[in-house]
Amino acid sequence: MADAEFSFDYNSFDYNSSYTPVNLSYEGLAHKIHPICSGEGLCMLLFVVNVLIIFLGIVGNGLVIWIAGFKMKKSVNTTWYLSLALSDFIFCAVLPFNTIYMATMDWTFGLFMCKFTSFVMFLNMFSSIFLLVVISMDRCASVMFPVWAQNQRTLKMASVIVVLAWVTSVALSIPSVVFRDVQEHLGMSRCMNNYTASEYSHRTVALSRFILGFIIPFLIIIICYSIIIFKLRSNQMAKSTKPFKIMTALIVTFFICWLPYHTFVLMELNQSLPNHILAHGLRIGTSAASANSFLNPILYVFMGNDFRRKFKSSFLSKIENAIGEEGRTLSRYLSRSSSMDARASTHI
């Protein structure tokens, strides 16, 4: 069984299946002519969308990397956002290979790139959500234990946590390397996942990605944010939510973008929809997931403090202000909470 993973390979079923992608014709196969999407409307639309994602993602995340890595003072917050931007930048840099494959349905880049592009894409998925979990837990710890956070929330600790998140993401992305393969199908090269060696490999890999890369992180983030909201309200600080609004936007965007992909992958496992509907659904879900990688820099800009009032300021200043704003506001909150806890302790 070869399945449709995050690779723009939408013909995800057995070679014996009667389903043929809508943008293939036997005449085209015979002559190896690859017009972009063969005039198919949905394919053309998604091709344009992916080109925009590549351009905006590389430019936007490149600016965030430059600002957070070289223009701003290193801090815990810049470490988080720099890591997110690096993950998205790498993803967008690899995306052109799969965009070309989506448009031509013929993989011409060899076995190594077939495995590498799939690996990088799942590396982006896992590293992004793990970093969002880390940031949520960091915010929660800062609110629940302000004195501890003031003393222990160091750049060195943040760097170690980021490395651990990336190592875990690499380990969970290895199945993309193991099962990825290039095979000839109807006279064309296909970059596909080949699970013929084990009956349960397909289901195991798909469910593990859904559980570890979506459900469990989502539950952890929900718990962290519930604690944060409860703590802020109990301290009558409900208005002091600036440190969390960008994170909230990033988290909501991630889950909205990735939910369609995971939904159609699960449907594919159960064959609950006709093949052609699954193929189109995976196309749309894959492109929606890709969009997450260029939206983050836009959120940094539009979620920055007083965006409308400062509309005339430079694009770079908006990004720097958005990233730095959380650190400044959170530091003020930690200082205030620490002093309050210190005063309370003198009365015990």
Image (spheres, rainbow, N blue to C red):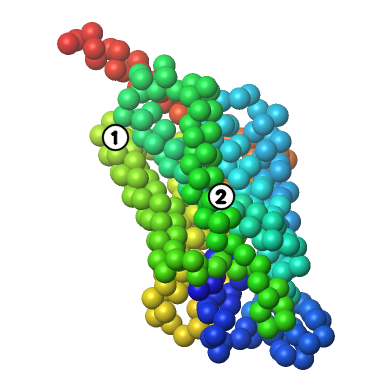
Q: Reply above or below: 164 against 101.
A: above
Q: Reply above or below: 194 against 317.
A: below
Residue 303 coordinates in the image, percent (x, y)? 55, 45
> What numbered label is drawn on residue 231?
1
Q: Distance between the residues labelled 2 and 1?
A: 34 Å
Name the residue furthest left: 348
Q: In which quarter of the image is residue 309?
A: top right
The earlier-in-sequence mark between 2 and 1 is 2
Q: Which of 106 and 157 is in front in this view?
A: 106
> What numbered label is drawn on residue 183?
none
Q: Which amino acid does label 1 sit on?
A: Lys
Name the residue furthest front: 197
Residue 65 coordinates in the image, percent (x, y)? 67, 38
Determine which residue is flagged by label 2.
Answer: 123
- Count the marks: 2
Give the residue displayed 61% in from the left and 86% down from the top. Answer: 20
- In this picture, residue 278 sits left or right of residue 214: right
Q: Which of 305 and 157 is in front in this view?
A: 157
Q: What residue type is labelled 2?
A: Leu
Give the residue displayed 72% in from the left and 81% down from the top. Answer: 187
Is residue 29 visible in the rendered structure shown here? yes
